[in-house]
Image: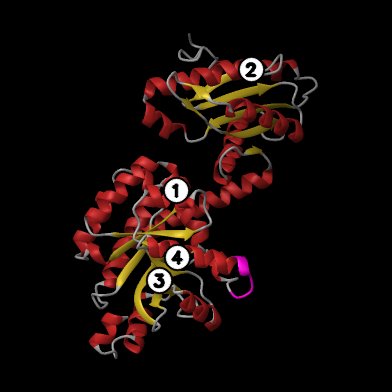
């Protein structure tokens, strides 16, 4: 019992350590390489939460059965922890063979799992470590395999990574960046900048999109394309997003009340049932009218846990918050998402806008989006407008709003107020309303 996983009947960590010790002893006089690996089931937790723990246990047992049936002679497969399985592979000596083995196991695990009245599919990510290059004992090898696995998970689903010193350095830098980011959130050092969104009919500002900015004393400027995904991966995107929303809402209190604030929600937040309550609580503490808030979500984000995302969106819209579908046209099944979810606004991705005057296909795609949104009574914002010609073309096609460097770069709260004084406050009230 001390060496067996009670659910799957596979060996456990103790069995794995004994196997590694056995191989090491056998090869003491001639330390030939061998490999250990860890496989992690991608998105197992949402499936377990959706169908229940008994269904989750059944999937784990089916995974164990497949792995036991396909590992080579002399190798060992164990249940490592939760939805992770480990391998000891005495006859895999180098990277290419480890990657080939991972590809074979990935294919085996990708077939549907039978839960009686339904089938589900899973992918798996892998990390491998080769003795003695990645460690000279079981603990060191496991640590290296876990480092490689973590890199695979960062790269997406179904990835395979074999440990190397370069990967270790990459992961070390990511850990250092994570700690600096956590400290920056605690010390309230993450800034919010605002980019104007304008009416293309008269070029007057109608709102601003809030964008995260981080300038660390030691690291310098860190791109949000780096630190926002890192916060999602390491599980503290909620803390980052809540701090940014509070700052953005506080800044927007000093704007004219008819201007809206646009704010991005992450995919992780759309899988957390507490998101809507958290957002509305922040707005209440700040004193910011929910009707002035627009939340931008991507199509990829709502695909992660559609039922939960649907409830979050419904709760927020019931409180007056408007919902925008960001990067429209670049995801999968966009028309299906428009049918399944209720949105107030569509944002056309820069990928189409940048080629509107040079590529007829892009122009026709934008025309089709505008026609569809008119029929669905959805507002439209074109993103990434960088020059006058793009703005004119979009206005001619009937696009209502635009955003991009042509109208203004992201700026901090003080500069945004200055922008408003120069471009908005000198307008007559009637002009503001028509904008």
Range covered by the magenta-colored residues: 357-361
Residue 359 part of the magenta segment: yes
Q: Position of residue 14 (x, y in %)?
A: 54, 17
Q: Alpha-carbon neighbours of circle 4 within 10 Å: few (<14), some, or many (≥20)?
A: some
* Secondary structure at numbered mark 3: strand
Tell me which numbered mark, 1 or 2, is placed earlier along the sequence: 2
Residues under numbered marks 3 and 1 in contact, where contact means CB atoms less than 8 Å apart: no
Q: Is residue 132 visible?
A: no
Rounded to the nearest angstrom, the CA distance separating label 1 from label 2 is 45 Å
Q: Position of residue 42 (x, y in %)?
A: 51, 35
* Secondary structure at numbered mark 1: helix
Relative to 255, residue 162 above or below: above
Query: Which mark identifies residue 76?
Result: 2
Residues under numbered marks 1 and 4 in contact, where contact means CB atoms less than 8 Å apart: no
Of tags 1 and 2, the one toward the viewer is 1
**Who's the residue at 32% across and 56% down the image?**
242
Q: Which residue is mark 4?
A: 371
Of tags 3 and 1, the one toward the viewer is 1
**Who's the residue at 26% across and 80% down the image?**
433
Relative to 151, residue 127 above or below: above
Residue 363 part of the magenta segment: no
Relative to 296, residue 144 above or below: above
């Amino acid at each position: 019992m001390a060496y067996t996983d009670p659910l799957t009947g596979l060996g456990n960590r103790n069995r794995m350590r004994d196997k590694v010790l056995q191989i090491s002893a056998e090869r003491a006089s001639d330390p030939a390489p061998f490999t250990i690996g860890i496989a992690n089931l991608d998105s197992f937790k949402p499936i377990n939460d959706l169908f229940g723990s008994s269904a989750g246990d059944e999937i784990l047992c089916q995974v164990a059965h497949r792995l036991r049936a396909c590992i080579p002679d002399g190798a060992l497969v164990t249940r490592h922890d939760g939805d992770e399985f480990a391998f000891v592979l005495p006859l895999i000596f180098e990277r290419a063979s480890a990657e080939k083995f991972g590809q074979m196991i990935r294919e085996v695990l990708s077939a549907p799992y039978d839960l009686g009245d339904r089938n589900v599919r899973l992918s798996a990510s892998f990390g491998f470590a080769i003795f003695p290059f990645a460690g000279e004992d079981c603990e060191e090898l496991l640590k290296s395999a876990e480092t490689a696995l973590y890199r695979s998970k960062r790269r997406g689903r179904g990835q395979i990574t074999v440990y190397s010193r370069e990967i270790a350095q990459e992961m070390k830098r990511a850990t250092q960046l994570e700690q600096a980011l956590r400290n920056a959130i605690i010390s309230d050092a993450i800034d919010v900048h605002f980019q104007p969104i304008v009416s293309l009919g008269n070029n007057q500002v109608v709102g601003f999109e809030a964008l995260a900015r981080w300038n660390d004393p030691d690291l310098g400027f860190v791109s949000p394309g780096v630190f926002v995904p890192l916060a999602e991966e390491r599980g503290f995107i909620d803390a980052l997003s809540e701090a940014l929303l509070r700052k953005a809402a506080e800044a927007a209190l000093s704007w004219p009340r008819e201007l809206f604030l646009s704010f991005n929600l992450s995919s992780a937040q759309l899988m957390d049932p507490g998101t809507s309550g958290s957002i509305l609580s922040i707005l209440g503490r700040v004193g910011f009218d929910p009707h002035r808030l627009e939340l931008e979500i991507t199509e990829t984000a709502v695909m992660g846990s559609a039922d939960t995302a649907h409830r979050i969106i419904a709760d927020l819209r019931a409180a007056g918050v408007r919902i925008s579908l960001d990067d429209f046209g670049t995801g999968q099944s966009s028309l299906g998402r428009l049918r399944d979810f209720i949105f107030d606004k569509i944002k056309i991705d820069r990928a189409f806008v940048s080629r509107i005057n040079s590529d007829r296909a892009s122009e026709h795609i934008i025309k089709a989006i505008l026609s569809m949104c008119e029929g669905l009574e959805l507002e439209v914002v074109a993103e990434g407008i960088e020059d006058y010609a793009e703005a004119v073309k979009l206005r001619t096609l009937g696009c209502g709003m635009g955003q991009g460097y042509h109208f203004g770069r992201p700026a901090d709260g003080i500069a945004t107020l200055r922008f408003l004084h120069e471009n908005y406050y000198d307008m007559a009230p009637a002009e503001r309303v028509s904008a």
